[in-house]
Amino acid sequence: MSATQTEHRPATPEEIWEILRQLAKRQKESEERQEEHEKRRKENEKAREKYWEKAAREWEEIRAEGRETDRRLKKAEDLFTSQWGRLMESLVKGDLVPLLQQRGIAVEMTTQRVAARRNGEHFEIDILAANGTEAVAVEVKTTLRPRDVKRFEEKLARFREWLPAYGGHRLYGAVAYLEADESVVRHAERRGLFVIRATGSSASIVNEPDFSPRAFS
């Protein structure tokens, strides 16, 4: 039998069935791969949904924490403003003038927030009490700390430079506070400053009876 006759020999039933089995096998494998792909796609889609759900929950928690933080900050700010306001009101409207008069300074006027600005610099005195020849600059702090005393002294050293209208006055300094350690109070006194403590709706000078204030100019 020639090679040409062998190549064109009709397939036997067994060979046909084998071909059909192979086709069926490949079809099944293809379908299984498609099912696996679809399964993974759904799993990935579900995972993405869970991720974004989790991200949304976490973002809402962060926003809630932010709102709580803002609320607490606002509460603290309101408390500070309230304390500051009570202290300023106590000093300006009630006690500062008689307190200084008791220490030999005949106050004729008081002014809040005496400010000046020049060349990008800002200078401010919280309260200024004065008569024709004397002036008392008052620095108000909710809590008085050592660095506040130092900075206030530096401010007093430049008082004439910034407020030349009071250049001919004898200048004294005072620090007023709601809270302070005793050591800070005594330090301020040693630096020649009047020390005024506010308690509730009143204020008092806590310097020793024989205290002599320092003239800064």
Image (spheres, rainbow, N blue to C red):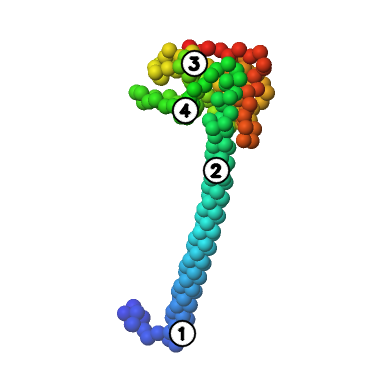
- Other residues around mark 3 within 10 Å, as few (<14) / some (14–19) / many (≥20): some
Q: Could you tell me residue 53's position as x and y percent?
A: 52, 62
**Measured Cα–Cα span from mark 1 to mark 2:** 90 Å
Q: Earlier in the sequence, mark 4 or mark 3?
A: 4
Label 1: element kind = helix
Q: Name the residue under label 3.
A: 134
Amino acid type, residue under disc 4 in the picture: Thr
* Label 4 crowd bin: few (<14), some (14–19), many (20+), radius 10 Å: few
Query: Residue 49, position in %: x, y?
Result: 50, 64
- Which of label 4 and label 2 is nearer to you? 4
Q: Secondary structure beneath disc 4?
A: strand
Task: Report how far apart the C-alphas of labels 4 and 3 lie in the structure.
Answer: 14 Å
Question: In percent of the image, x 58 and y 24: which residue is there?
Answer: 98
Q: What residue type is labelled 2?
A: Asp
Q: At 45% from the left edge and 78% from the top edge, which residue is drawn?
A: 27
The amino acid type of the residue labelled 1 equals Trp
- Residue identifier under label 2: 78
Label of residue 111 in the image: 4
Of labels 3 and 1, earlier in sequence is: 1
**Residue 108 visible to the viewer:** yes
